Image (cartoon, rainbow, N blue to C red):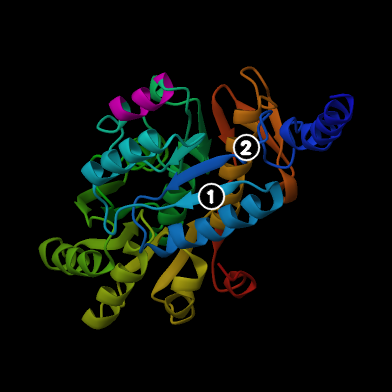
Amino acid sequence: MNRLALTLAALLALLLPTACKKENGGATSSGKQLTIAMMPKSKGNSYFMAARRGAEDAARELNVKLLWDGPTDPDPAKQNEMVDSWIVRGVDVIAVACENRDGIASVLKKARNKGIKVVTYDADTAPDARDLFVNQATPEGIGNTLMDTAASLLGNKGEFAIITASLTAGNMIEWQKCIEARRASKYPDMKMAALRPCDDLQQKAFDEAKTIMNAYPNVKLIMAICSPAVPGAAEAVKQAGRTDVKVIGLGLPSENKKYVHEGITQAVILWNTMDLGYLTVFASDALKKGTLKPGDTSIDAGRVGKIEIKGDNILLGKPTVFDKDNIDKFDF
């Protein structure tokens, strides 16, 4: 019996260090690897494909399991279904770019009630439906930069039109409010003639740009505020031969270099989308582990450095204006 007891003690001594891992390397205190489920608005959108690259980089650094999935096309109902499936699966964190701000709130609250941390990025939901929002830039920063750029190109007067992704996306609604506030306060001689949704589809943005040019002949600038809409609008302007119509918007440098160098698109405005995905995973990991707490004013986020937190918003930084002079320096 003594020999058997010694043998059992030796086995326990070997097993205990594995069973009682400390919380590090992306693992919980129980030793289980963290699972972060991250959802784009749509999987085929190049903007979110770039965000995924950054998210995967962070997941490798932190040794967390990243589940990346989402609807093929923007679909609020599909987003809700996928969140429900992740709740059943028992993931640790859900990070989602919300297609419908209010429509997804109930299922995200359900996830929180189950003990799952909820982070939004790119497009927010109701504040009580998530823990944190990883904000690519403030709505004021985006709206002011877009409106100031448009005004500069039109000499502070004239008509412009906006092509948005959808009329329900919370981030775009906020950007539009800030664009209008800037216009009203600084550029009263400018007028927004039309606001058209393209459902985050480049072909539909092309069609909407053609419609705008035909229906509103005095529009001299198209402002595209979702990434597929910028090249879509530029191609429509190019094919129409409308050298009098300028194009600006929120888009990826890689998708718009051609049109910028051809002089069709005058400026592309965006943040580093890869860094947005990277920061989202970093914040999700810190939130679940408890190293990121309510009231913190900053987070040290690996390669992107120290990032400011205002309230429950983690702020990636100010948008960058890409034009002929600098667009070739960026590869995302």
Looking at the image, can residue 49 be seen? Answer: yes
Quarter placement of the N terminus: top right
Judge left or right: residue 159 versus residue 225. left
Q: Amino acid at mark 1?
A: Leu
Q: Quadrant of residue 124?
A: top left
Residue numbers of the magenta segment: 106-113
User: In the rendered image of this protein, does residue 256 appear above or below residue 37?
Assistant: below
Q: Main secondary structure of the magenta part?
A: helix
Which mark is drawn over residue 66?
A: 1
Residue 43, by quadrant, is bottom left
The relative height of residue 328 versus residue 277 in the rendered view (above or below) is below
Residue drawn at point x = 23 percent, y = 70 percent:
203
Q: Residue at x 26, y 77 (%)?
A: 242
**Do callouts 2 and 1 mark residues in contact (Cβ within 8 Å)?**
no
Q: Residue 77's spot in the image, x, y percent? A: 21, 42
Distance Cα–Cα, label 2 vs label 1: 14 Å
Earlier in the chain: of badge 2 and badge 1, it is 2
Element marked by disc 2? loop
Residue underneath mark 2: 32
Question: Does residue 160 appear in this view?
Answer: no
Relative depth, front residue between 124 and 204 = 124
Q: Dot 1: within a 10 Å radius of its alpha carbon, few (fewer than 14), some, or many (20 or more) residues? A: many
> Any magenta on residue 261?
no
Residue at position x 40%, y 50% from top?
A: 40
Dot 2 crowding, Cα within 10 Å, few <14, some 14–19, many 20+ = few
Give the image location of residue 291, x and y in percent. Answer: 70, 27
Nearest the eye: 112 or 52: 112
**Percent position of residue 201, x then y:** 26, 63
Front position among marks 2 and 1 = 2
